[in-house]
Image (cartoon, rainbow, N blue to C red):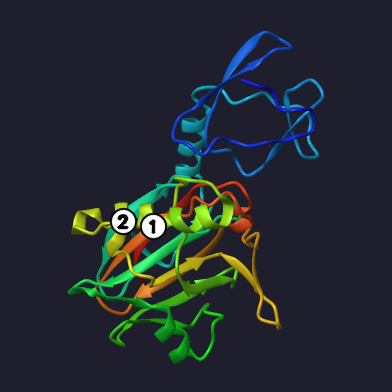
Amino acid sequence: MRRAPAGALFREPSSLWTELVTDLANGRSFMIGLRLPRSIHRLGADGRRRAFGETMTELRKPDELLAHERDLASRPISPPAGRVIEDVLVPARGFLPARRLSAGDAMRIVDIEGQQVADLVFYDATNLKNVSSMTNTMLINQTWKITEGHTFYAKFGQAMATITEDTVGTNVVLGGFCNPDLNERRYGIVGTHSCRANLAASMAQYGLGPADIEEGCWCPFMNVDHDPGGALAIRPPLSQPGDHIDFRAEMDLIVAFSNCPSEHNPCNGWNPTALRVLIYRAA
């Protein structure tokens, strides 16, 4: 493998495999995991990774990723006010198999390492054709800045879920989601990981595929600038480690969940990381 020049950004490959990198200076080999902790590293003059503003760090060892994910899954976080039914780690670039929430149940999404976005679509548990509608949500709430106190509405008008806590306050409700076709047009890269594939995988147990996923998506923690002249631009999320957003189901819901894998723009701070999801019954 050709070695990156000193000072170059060192990024992980966009695949589910690991890459073997040889430290030519020391004649040693290291296995690099796919999902970095939040810090992005720079190659120093000696070819070894340095974190920005930090001292030289060792390359990732074979078991470091799994140990890191286990640490994230057990790391203490702010508990919700209620009885926790489930607490699950959603890995970087991964998905959560769709969860069913009864009316009154709640979900908390925790950004464990900061600057990570999720993509969610709500489904009426009695009619999968009745999905969340961001158009209805914005028109009924009379704002596109959907945050604590606002309710999401279905395609057929019913109240679906209400945000009860939001420690960041920046969420995107444009309806769409990243997909390979869009990414090819934007970046010229074929076959990227995408929220469309993740959402389809999340809903596979209900017989849905990629073509069935409607544009009823909202994106907790995503940060998009809207210029007064009409331009918009994706910016790095404002969320810090431990930030969270909670919503309460207003009807029986099925929640499709993608941990956004985008890494060709600052949507996830250029480096997708894990999220925690807590399902609980509010006190």
In the rendered image, the residue lying farthest to the top is 27
Left or right for 74, reference 206:
right
Total count of labels = 2
Instruction: Please state which amino acid type lies under the numbered disc 1.
Output: Arg
**Foreground of the two, 58 or 71:** 58
User: Label 2: few (<14), some or many (≥20) within 10 Å?
Assistant: many
Left or right for 263, reference 159:
right
Which picture quadrant has residue 26?
Answer: top right
Left or right for 120, reference 264:
left
**C-alpha separation, residue under disc 1 versus residue under disc 2:** 6 Å
User: Residue 124 at what x, y percent from top left?
Assistant: 25, 74
User: Residue 236 at what x, y percent from top left?
Assistant: 65, 59
Q: Is residue 86 above or below residue 140?
A: above
Residue 48 showing in the rendered view: yes
Which picture quadrant has residue 191?
Answer: top left
Give the residue at x 51% y 52%.
Answer: 184
Asked which secondary structure carries label 2, the reply is helix
Asked which secondary structure carries label 1, the reply is helix
Q: Is residue 148 above or below residue 28?
A: below
Give the residue at x 78% y 35%.
Answer: 54
The residue pinned by badge 2 equals: 200
Left or right for 246, reference 106:
right
Q: Is residue 231 above or below residue 139?
A: above
Q: Are marks 1 and 2 in contact (CB under 8 Å)?
A: yes
Instruction: Please state which amino acid type lies under the numbered disc 2.
Output: Ala
Quadrant of the image for the C terminus? bottom left
Quadrant of the image for the N terminus? top right
Checking the image for residue 216, the label placed there is none
The residue pinned by badge 1 equals: 196
